[in-house]
Amino acid sequence: MFIRIKKINGNDYAYHVHNKRVRGKIRQKVKSYLGKAIIASKTKDLDFFSFVKKDLETYTAEKSYRDIIYDLVIWELSRHDINDVDINLKRYSVTKEGSAVVIKMNEGYMYNKILNHLLKFQAVGDDEYFIGKEFAEAMVKAGIDAPKELFVKLFEKLHTN
């Protein structure tokens, strides 16, 4: 599955699309509509720890895994100059004016399903390398470019819970 952005009447819309082989040819099928798409470019080179106004050790000691994910999302939105989007951790929703949206930023897409996946991330197995790789892929898919030292601390919080 992947996300396709379609421009319709000058507006961008996002869809989950699935590839399927039919009689030797690849066919694409739209699985679901995700919402209006916001295509964002990074406008600010803002350091995460300047954004939260704390150093790594103090910040990670005070914050839960969920709180750190939320702060990372808000930080990325700030770096991409997106101010009018609501992130709701209880509903796992990314909305604008009450409607679901998909935000393309960095190398990924932030939307309801990926936010849910990040917040409920479950390590499968006990091989730290593969768990770390899967977690890193989830962060990239969500469009979050976390500082390396924070990623390590976040992974430790995830792995110890």
Image (cartoon, rainbow, N blue to C red):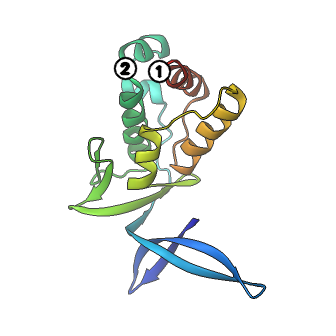
Give the vertical position of 132 relative to 160 (above or below): below
Q: Would you call the spot at circle 1 few (<14 residues within 10 Å), some (14-19), or many (20 or more)?
A: few
Ranked by sequence position, the earlier of labels 1 and 2 is 2
Report the amino acid beneath label 1: Asn
User: How many marks overall?
Assistant: 2
Query: In the rendered image of this protein, does residue 134 appear above or below residue 66?
Result: below
Residue 11 x %, y %: 38, 78
Closest to the observer, 6 or 30:
30
Location of mark 1 (residue): 161
Tell me what residue is drawn at x 41 percent, y 17 percent: 59
Horizontal and vertical percent position of residue 36: 36, 69
Q: Residue at x 52, y 18 (%)?
A: 160
What is the quadrant of the N terminus in the image? bottom right
Q: Nearer the viewer, residue 132 or 68?
A: 132
Taking depth in this image into account, of 44 and 111 the one nearest to the observer is 111
Residue 29, percent across and down? 55, 80
Q: Secondary structure at mark 1?
A: loop
Nearer mark to the viewer, of 1 and 2 = 1
Residue under the image location 46 percent in, 51 percent down: 114
Image coordinates of residue 78 in percent, x first then y, are: 38, 44
Report the Cα–Cα distance between label 1 and label 2. Answer: 14 Å
Q: Residue type at mark 2: give it.
A: Lys
Number of the label disc, if any, that sits on residue 63? 2
Could you tell me which secondary element the residue under label 2 belongs to?
A: loop
Q: Residue furthest right?
A: 24
The image quarter containing residue 135 is top right
